Image: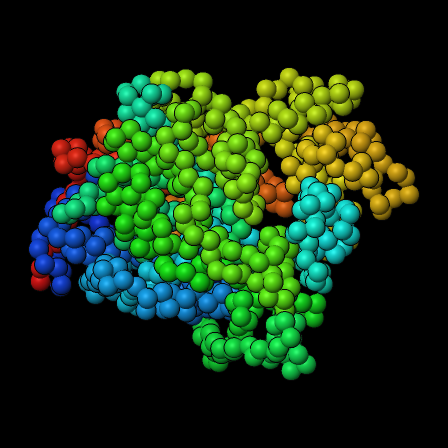
Amino acid sequence: MHGRRRLVFVVLLVALILLPVLLLGHIRFYSHQSRLPESGRELVQIRGIRDQVTIALDGRGVPHIDAATVEDLWLAQGYVHARDRFFQMDLGRRMAAGRLSEVFGEAALPMDRKMRTLRLAATAGRQAAALDDGVRKTLQRYSDGVNAALRDYGRWIAPELWMLGIEPVEWGVEDCLSVALLLELNLTWAMGDEITRSVEMTHLGRDHAVDLWGWGPEEQRRWIPPVDLPSRPPEEDDAIMPPFGGGSNSWAISPARTATGRPLLANDPHIGVAVPGTWYAVGLRAPGIHAVGASIAGNPGVLIGHNNRVAWGFTMSMMDDQDLFVLTLDESRDRELVDDSWIPLRTVTETIAIRWRSEPETMKVRFSRHGPIVRDTFDSTLALAWTALQGPSVVDAFLRMVRADGVEDVAAAWSDAAGPSMNLVAADVEGHILHQVVGRRPRRGRGAGRLPSPGSDSAWSWKGLVEFSKNPRMLDPDEGFVGTANHDLFGEGDYSPKQTFPADFAAPWRIRRIRNLLAAKTDWDIDSCLDLQGDVMSGRAVAFLKALWPDLERHGGPTSMALLGWDGRMDVNRVEPLLFSRLILELAREVGQDEALDLGLEATPFDAERVLRLLAGGLSEAWWDDVRTETVEDRESIIDRCLDRLDLLDHSTVWGDVHQVDFSHVLNDFPLVGALLRLGGHRHPVGVAGDGTTVNAHYWDIAKPFAVMAIPSMRFVADVGDWDRSILVLPLGQSGRPWSPHVADQFSDWLGLRGRTLPFSRQMIEAETRAELVLTPR
């Protein structure tokens, strides 16, 4: 009897061990059939295609599409996007539409409520109705390609669909527009900043708040509205906090400053860590179109890249394109006050289906004349005005860029786009380089959108959007280069202060480093641009050391002595960057944690830049005092306290031991599915150099030290005119398919700052081809 039980136990144990392995093998076998080919030649018949399309796949799995007609080109791009990235595409459209709960159950409800409130899917529907016929046909052909792949492979188009037990739904024009709107949401966070400033103002008082923000009397007079501001900090349920976006770098160098006499263009957008990654490299060739670069799975075209005439790249301009308005409602809360009249609110009922729950959730979304009401609580009712919800789709600009003949054409492609607001940098074969702010900013009545405005006073309302022709632009400057790093274009001397617009600019450290190095030589090439993209010298660290030098010399402990001998480079294998970053963290907590408790915030209101301003004498000395104690603390006592604590830590730990990026699949924590994905290969967290102030930017936040939140999402350098020498490297790889050989085959190049050429000419594509996919009419 005991032997039989022991046998049963052993059989069950073996089954439990083998089941995940067998299941994984089953998934990998069937999902492999829908992967893009990695060798040989694959013929596929496609319904709706007009002529044969040849897709050459290079050694990294990048598809180079060669079509006889433009219509077939877009269909083929949709087809390869679906076979390599459909799960990412599906997740994006579900997020935009507020339909994640259909897959993930109640855990996704907070996000779905946010997205239903923002109404991205409804906006996509409005944009679709207004599309130019040519753009509509392009998006439909792209969608036809996606759907052709779905018909051929069903849920095996992406193994995650099979593991989650969901069937793919056809792709449509509005899905393309929704994904583009989701991209725009990732490129703005102004409304969250308005709420945070409101909380700081109401809890700290006006004098302390404006001291913290650095607002002088004139800014206070123009920017602080006559309205009761929200006093409750942002919470998870508020529909006001977008995903972390980070920043970016870009520059273009004129022929006079390059070793070859041809322009160079470099771009490395900094975006939140994601698996699969944001970008999908693709080559496009058809009559009138020959382009290559980074696309967004879910839309046709190339967003960052080049054609045979011009190269282009983008960074965020940091323009404030969102405003919150404090509404005054009547007793029924169904009407808002506008000047002397009561205007009815518009209400829409949303129904959210929830997996594993029998009944859906219904919610009411209400609309002011300013936009959707994103917060309705006891202390405030806030409506959101956002350029993305008011203008046409940005997709038209994506499509017009690939046909551009020069830098002026690339800029003109954005003339009708309301957003997102970005810095466009371009360089063409005629030797021209250009910087142009794209996207249209609000024409505000009063105020600057720094704090929520009174919604009942029409003088503070938006008066439309400012014309594109009013945006800052620079063509062929005397310096021989243009550069952007999310910086203050007016405070750093790019343009006259008279042209300024409300924005939340990044600190100037990256752009100053970029400009100093660009100006220092006249023989720039691809390799030196890559070196600049990998630079880890921190101007902020140097400024901190200068401000702290007397304190460090006076203190004289191990931490002080290490920092006194440091040059400010955020190297991955050195201890000084970690000591410096921990000192920032300690100082921010010491000077701001007492106020944070009063504010109801999770973290101190001090970030590194505010700490630096305090050290340099730019803030009131009163901040040094801890208001929770009877003793009056001063600068010396607080700095010594922080340094004493750091002296007790293990100084053998280096920056890369804690400053790490974790490339985890979005389903990593999902029951069973995450386990299967980890069995298929999980890349452990890896230490990286730099921080948010270095050109090689890896951002961490004071609220979550020192985990990396955003990274260079690709590195692109174009040799304008000798296109086959251009390089593009992704953080992981081209494919979004688990277990594909191209899911992470670029990681070592990205980490090691090595470039890999992106084929453009037919000759180079043929030399690099490892597999071929041929689409023929069915």
Q: Is residue 8 left or right of residue 631?
A: left
Q: How many labels were placed on the picture?
A: 0
Could you say which quadrant of the image residue 482 lies in?
Answer: top left
Q: Is residue 579 above or below residue 11?
A: above
Q: Nearer the viewer, residue 721 or 447?
A: 447
Residue 32 screen position, x and y as percent: 24, 53
Q: Where the N terminus falls, by quadrant?
A: bottom left
Residue 210 screen position, x and y as percent: 72, 46
**Do we see residue 756 in this rendering?**
no
Could you say which quadrant of the image residue 759 lies in?
Answer: top left
The residue positioned farthest toward the right in the image shown: 630
Q: Is residue 202 left or right of residue 440?
A: right
Residue positioned 51% across, 56% down in the render: 443
Residue positioned 41% across, 50% down in the render: 468
Q: Is residue 370 left or right of residue 165?
A: right
Q: Nearer the viewer, residue 275 or 131?
A: 131
Q: Is residue 482 above or below residue 296?
A: above
Q: Nearer the viewer, residue 449 or 487?
A: 449
**Do we see residue 636 in this rendering?**
yes
Q: Is residue 587 above or below residue 422?
A: above
Q: Nearer the viewer, residue 632 or 128?
A: 128
Could you say which quadrant of the image residue 63 lies in?
Answer: top left
Q: Is residue 343 left or right of residue 331?
A: left
Residue 236 screen position, x and y as percent: 59, 61
What colour scheme does the image use?
rainbow
Residue 778 screen position, x and y as percent: 9, 62
Residue positioned 79% across, 29% down in the render: 640
Residue positioned 44% across, 45% down in the render: 471
